[in-house]
Image (cartoon, rainbow, N blue to C red):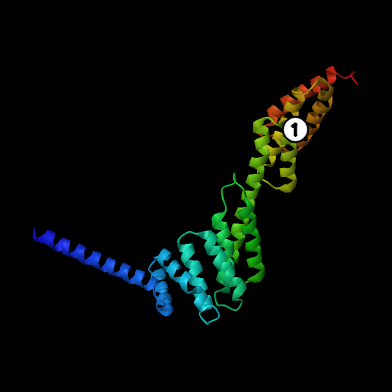
Amino acid sequence: MFKNRILFGVLFATAAVILSGCGEYEKLLKSNDFKAKYEMGVKMYEEGEYARAGTLFDQVANVYRGTTKADTVKYYQAKSYYGQRDYMMAGYYFNELSVTYVSSVYLEESDFMVAYCYYKQSPRAELDQETTFKTITAMQMFLSRHPTSDKVSECMTIVTEMRDKLVEKSFISAKLYYDLGYYDSAILALRNSLMEYPETGHREELMFLILRSSYLLADRSIPSKQRDRYQATVDEYLSFIGEFPDGPHSKEAKRMYESSNKFLEENNNET
């Protein structure tokens, strides 16, 4: 019983402290003491209370505009949103700091964080890659502005990662036409992917899918178009086997080649 009373007392005291802090915060929100709001914002940010800190910095940002603390307020405002994983708003405020306060001690970090917030928003390869392109552009801009930064290596790693994602997106998008059975469109999309990313790790797969799409397109075409399309399949086979003579698709490729040649030989006299 005595231990329970002690435990209850500790819990009650803790709750009282928390409620007191909440009351102080709510009271501060309604006040015009902007210095106290700034100081409380810094304290809450350092304690990891990013949402509350962000609210306080939102309230004082305009008040401190034009003062010597303006860039510091903007920095904490951006960092508070980043702490909440609101990368869109964090990037917006980091960019505002970079554009407005070009002599700030936070400039280099802000330039990097603009790019990094885009990076944090970059989706998986299957989805739209607009923010991936923005990440690459922003990272390259950072490298141009801060070539001696200790973030250079990290930037280059991220740019490589984002480019790899674009390659993957290109492959997935092109292969989709093949999966849906739109072989004419698949050939065009697969070739475009190869042209845009010639060093892709999917090169063999892309070339094989072009060959297979060409063969299936010929096989399912009306008679008047089959000869030209089987000839195109033979041409695609020669390109494919020239690069990948012993690849995992070589046997299947040869089968399509022989089938296409057989058709051409049997229809050699047709015009």
- Let me know if residue 258 appears in the view: no
Type of amino acid at the residue the image marks with label 1: Asp
In the image, is 231 to the left or to the right of 127?
right
**Does residue 163 lie above or below 264 as drawn?**
below
| Displayed quadrant of residue 206 | top right
| Callout 1 crowding tier (Cα within 10 Å): few <14, some 14–19, many ≥20 | some
Position of the C terminus, as image quadrant, is: top right
**Left or right: residue 250 compared with residue 28:** right
Question: Where is residue 34 drawn, in percent x and y?
Answer: 43, 78
- Residue tagged by mark 1? 184
- Disc 1 element: helix
x then y, percent, for residue 240: 75, 35
| 228 and 8: which is toward the camera | 8
Q: List x then y, in percent, for residue 7.
A: 16, 61
**Vertical comparison of 164 with 224: above or below:** below
Residue drawn at the location 60% of the way across and 79% of the way down:
103
Q: Residue 228 is drawn in which quadrant?
A: top right
Q: Residue at x 75, y 30 (%)?
A: 214
Q: Quadrant of residue 152?
A: bottom right
Residue found 68% across the figure and 29% down from its top: 181
Residue nearest the viewer, comparing 52 with 229 = 52
Residue furthest toward the left? Answer: 1
